[in-house]
Each structure stands twice: as structure tokens, then as C-alpha cells.
Image: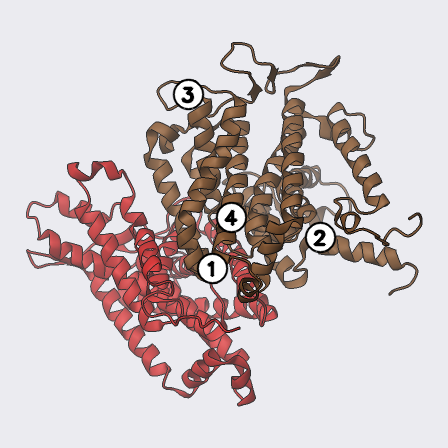
Amino acid sequence: MRGRPMLYTRYESDQALLNTGTKKVMMGLFIVLLVLIPFGVVPGLTFLSQPDWMRLLSTVCIFAVGALGLNILTGLAGQVSLGHAFFMGLGAYTAAWFGVEPGPLSGLGLPMWVWLPLAGLVPAIVGVLIGPVAVRVRGLYLAFVTLGLVFIGEYIFRNWVYATGGPDSGRTFPSLEWKIWKEETPLVDFQSDGVWFGVEIIEEAKTYFLMLLLLVIFVLLAKNIQRTRVGRAFQSIRDRDIAAEIMGVNEVQYKLVAFGLSSFYAGIAGALLATFIGRTIPERWNLFLSVQFIAIILIGGAGVVSGVILGSVFVTVLPRLVQDFSSWLADYVSEGEGAFVWLADLFISTGSGDFGLVNTLPGVGPGLSVFQFNQVLYGLLIILFLIFEPLGLYGIWLRIRNYWKGWPFTY
Amino acid sequence: MTPDLLVVIAQEASTPSKFAQMVVDGVNLGGIYALLAVGFVIIFRATQVLNFAHGALAALGAFLVASFATVLDIPGRWIPNAPAWVSWTGAVFLALIAAALIGMALERVFLRPMVGEELFAVAIVTLGMDIVVRNITNDWIGPQPRPLGDPFGISVFDLGWVRIPYTVVTQTVVALLAVALIAYFFRSRMGVAMRATAFDQEAARAQGISVGRVFSTSWAIGAVLAALAGIFISLFPRRSTGVDPTTAFFAFRAFPAIIIGGLDSVVGALVGGLIVGFAEAGASSYLVGENWEFLGTGFAGIVPYLLMMVVLIIRPYGLFGTEEIRRV
């Protein structure tokens, strides 16, 4: 139906992932862009091909996978969970248990195609086992049960030294490489520089491609969960649980499914995060990590996959931007030239006796450290988005889109 | 966390009765949890806000006392000849007033726009508030703990079979006083207005009650109780070094107390606080030693959460909470 993009003659085309021609073209271009970024050939985005930015983009993909999981539970099924970090930790240690070569700590040395799915399955099983408690309590009580889960999990991770390495040194995680079984040289090694299809490629870019591929897989999975029977059941429970039950949605069963799916995603994200970082201590899987994921889905837009990805980009890249900005400001102030030095000086403090909101030198003078400033910014953003834009970044995008749809008319 | 009290006891030659000491510890912990829980529940009942920033408010209160009493020396600088306890009490009162004002301001700025929104959304706003307040407070505190400059020190009433720290006596008196005042307050005009608001906000408004003022008052009360708890967290039997960046997290262990008692019951909060306090004290004095080595470190810290899970399986709305009636 040329020229009438919103006219659907079949239910399938209405429910298609890319239901308009514009979406198809834009998504194609976007994927080409994402693939080209590591080679530094995209004008204006060449800086993204540097190793540290590549690592950041990989982190974005990992966080997006985790956030998609929380989105299934909180955004679709409407169950508030603060326990995401616990399931991520569980996934990470499952991956370590199956993936690391045997040594002083636990390890079976199995390849990635074994440990990655298991890192999702084990947390999913635990999630379903804990589920009955979580299904019995409702609403706000659930938030506290999952809060307790994080603390209990932290205690277990701290004390089970054989699996987690304990709080002092932590442990290593399996390396990102593709093996058939336990052979010496892996088929694909994602953690060393090399040549792919005749093109030189750095290790960070390889990791990025792996994470991007996994993200695409999990986005498709999440999208399909959302638009099929299970997803619609989740949304009906979220909107009105009693009405859902009367329509024949088995509330207990679907809540358990939501818990399992969300924990599966969390476990995968945890395993990827841990292997990506390489060595980590049990305290990483703490309440702050959970709050970060809540921030992602609230800032991005709860219940919307593209919103969740926007949120992951925002929350992961923001600290880096703040850091760059404040160190740039600090240089600007110390040079002492320019019309806005006084303004920058109010914001930044560069030494003792200098008052400013943010302090770039750790431990000297007043002012928040860059890390603390980031945290305060997170907190403020969560509050402001909830007050002014409950649909998150996705809501902003929706408004922009609707404005241009009707342009030049306002309706 | 090892309670400092037990360390001190271990060093003394004469050993007091373990059980009696555990009771003292339980009263100490339970009192702190009860103060936190009651403030939390009052805020929840009156304003329908689940305040995740309660721990941050506690740490902020303790920090205010530390700065008033030691750094700024207010009101000590204006009354040079007063004994130490007078100026310290003055500093505490000023800090409590400041905490009340901060609590009211937070409610007015961040939570008033959210009136009528979903409970969950409002709860997440307070989670954001917690991050903001906690980080700013921790920045003010700095990396080193700040002593509160209290006159109690580590003095104890030594009865031979039990040692009761001065702070525990003071804390018990203060907590009982606070509970009595709150019970009295609920009978006052404002208190009745608050109960009416808790019952039904719109109906209360229709009766001419200023719901906004009720919100402010409840946040002031909640913040004062949190600050009191924060002060006692930062004193001798718990952390004699003073308020530090982990003080805010201490309050997270009061959440099980709230849940065990039931989210919307003040009495439940009191009872829950004491239960959790005694459970934790019991675990930290009895579940140690060779037989219990498999529990590892920090088991006492998660006893409240385990207890919470058990209670929730049996009674999903806590011991005293009202069961949510589900209507079609």
C-alpha cells in the first residue's frame, strides 16, 4: 500500500517488528552504522573507534541486556524488583564455575556455548524457586523482599570463597573466546587483536561485535515476548491483576514466568559484565547496581524496548561525559582565559580553598568528587524524569515524532 | 559487623552474663530500628510515600549533630561556661530542628508534585532522593568518621553481671519519650487530621483539613525520628567512631522491621523493630564460635532479612499490617 503507511490490511503486518517503510530503512541504516563504528569510517563518530569508547559501547550492550530483563519484570509484568543485582551475580559466578580452568577456585573449563546459556538458566531456575514468596506478596512488599535478596546474596557471595574468591581479591572469569570443546587455540578469540576477513581489528572492537550480536539476539527475543501471548498476559497483569485473572490469565504462573525470564536476562548480563571486566569482587553485585537498572528503565521508558536501549546508552555514557566535561572545565579554568571562566569556576573546584560544586582532584578541597557528582546526577535524573516525563526518553522521542508527523499543524 | 560492646567486654577480666549483655544489645539495636521504623510508617501512613531515603536522613541527622557539636560549636560558642552536656543537648536540638526542616523541604520539592501518582513511582522518587541526599551527606562527612562529640563516651553502669552503657539508657529514655509524644500527638488536633488523611486524603480535604500541612508535619516527625536513630547509630555501643559513609546503609536493616510489623502499623513498627533488634543481637552473640564457623562473617547482618522472608511467607502483610482487600 504505497503512500499509506498506517493502513494495514493484515494483522501480521500491523504487529510486524518494523511495521512501516521508514522504520525498515532507518533500522537498516542504524545497523550499518553500528557495524561501521569500530572501523572509524563514520564521519563525526571516528572517536568512537578508540579502545576506551569501544569498551564503553560494549558496556552499553551488556547493560541493555540486563535492563531488558528488568523491563520484562517491571515494565511489562509490573512487578517491582530491586533484586536484579543478585541474579546478575548468580549468573556471573555460574559462568565462572563452568567456564574457568580448574584451579584453586571452582572451575570446569567448559567453552562459551556451555557457560553462557547456563549463566542464564541457573538464575532463571533460582528465580522461579524464589518466585512463590515473591508471588505471594504484592506490590510494595515485593520491593522489600527483593531488597532482602540483594543483601542475602551479597552475604552468600562474600562467604562462599570457593566460588567467588571472597571479598579481598575476588576471582577471574572465563575469557571471551569461541571454542568447540577444550582445545588449545580457540576458533574466535574476542580478547586479542587480529584480522577478520582481511581487515585489521582491535580486541575492543571484537568484544563490541560479540556484545552487539548478543544484544540483537536478546532484543529480538524481548520484542517477541512482548508482542505474543506471554507478553500480553504480563501487560494485563500489570494493568489490572484481577481483570487479567477473570480473562483467564493464570496470574501465579505468568508471574513465575516473568521472574524466570527476567532472571535469565540478568544472569546473562551478569556473566557478560564479569567476563568483560575480567576480575571482580562479590561487592559489585550490590544494591547500587540494581538501582542503576531501575534508573535505566525509568529514564529510558518503562515497558518499551527501544526506550530501554536509549536508557542504557544514557546511563552508561553519562558518567564518561561528566568526567570529560569536568576535566575539560578544569583545564579551562586553570588556563584562566575566556569569558566564562568565572562561571566554570563556580562549577568546578581545582584545589584547596577553591569552592565549587565538583572537585576534580580526589580528596582535596570542598565539592563533590566526579563519582559522587555522577551519583547525585543519577538520583536527580530519576526524580526529574518521574515527575516531568514518566515515559522517559521514549516519551520525549514520541512527542518529537508526533510533532513532525502533524507538521506544520499542531494536531 | 562486630558490636564494639562485645569487644570491650572480651577485654575485661570479669565477664558479665552473656544473656544479660545480649538483652542490652537487643534493646540498643531494637530501639534504633524501632525509631527508624516508626518514622517510616508515620510518613507512609500520612502521605502514602514509601521513603527509601530514610537511611540518608538518619546519616544526615547524625552529621548535623557532629558538625553543630564539634566543628561549628553551636550553641556552645554562645554559652562558654555551660557544662558539656548542656551545649551538646543544645546542638542535638538544633540538629533535630534542621533535620525536620530538611525533611519538610524534601517533601515539598520532590514529593508534592507526585501526589496521586502510583505508589511505586513515588517510591522510586524517594530512591532517587536517597542517592542525592546520601552522596551529598557522605561528601560532607568525608572519608574519615566524624565523632559526635557526645558527653557519654564509653561509660557504662557496671552492675557486675551486666554492663549498661550510658547511651543505651539515654536512648531508651529518648525512645520511650518519643513514643509517648507521638501517642499524645495522635490525640491532638493535628494528629486527628493526620489520621483522617491516612484514612482518605480526599475526604480529609473535603472536611477542610489542610492535607499539605499534614504532609509537612509527618515528614518533619519522620525526619526527626530518623535523625535520632542516626545519632544513636553513631554512638558508643554501635559505632563509637561517629558518623561515616556507611551509616546511611545501616538503616536498610530497619526495612525488615517495618515489613515484619506491617507497612501501615505504628505499633507493628515498634514491635518489628524490637524483634529484629533482638534477633540480630542474639545472632551476633550466640551464633559465633567454632560450631557456627560455617556461617562465615556478617551472618547477624542478614538475620533481619531472613526473618522478614519467613514472616512474609506466613503472613504476606506482616504481623500487624492491614490486609489489602482485592475487589473487582
Above/below status of B57 relative to A120: below
Can you tell which chain is drawn brown? A
Q: How far apart are the two marked residues, 4 and 3, measured between alpha carbons?
A: 30 Å
Q: What residue type is labelled 2?
A: Tyr
Give the x, y percent position of residue B35.
Answer: 33, 66
Residue A98 visible in the shown view? yes
Give the x, y percent position of residue A223.
Answer: 67, 45
Q: How far apart are the two marked residues, 2 and 1, measured between alpha carbons?
A: 27 Å
Q: Residue at x 48, y 31 (%)?
A: A118
- Label 3 and label 1 in one chain: no
- Label 4 and label 3 in one chain: yes
Q: What residue type is labelled 4?
A: Val
Q: Which chain carries label 4?
A: A
Residue A133 lies in quadrant: bottom left
Q: How many C-alpha atoms fall within 10 Å of the one at disc 4: few (<14), some, or many (≥20)?
A: many
- Residue at mark 2: A394
Residue A108's disc is: 3
- Residue at mark 1: B53
| Disc number lying in front (4 or 1) | 4
Considering the numbered disc 2 on the image, is that residue within a helix, a strand or a loop? helix
Q: Mark 2 lies on which chain?
A: A
Considering the numbered disc 1 on the image, is that residue within a helix, a strand or a loop? loop
Q: How far apart are the two marked residues, 4 and 1, measured between alpha carbons?
A: 32 Å
- Label 3 and label 2 in one chain: yes
Mark 2 or mark 4, which has the lower sequence index? 4
The N terminus of chain B lies in which quarter of the figure? Answer: top left
Q: Which residue is drawn at 32% across and 48% down?
A: B302
| Disc number lying in front (3 or 1) | 3
Can you tell which chain is drawn red? B
Q: Which amino acid does label 1 sit on?
A: Ala
Residue B78 lies in quadrant: bottom left
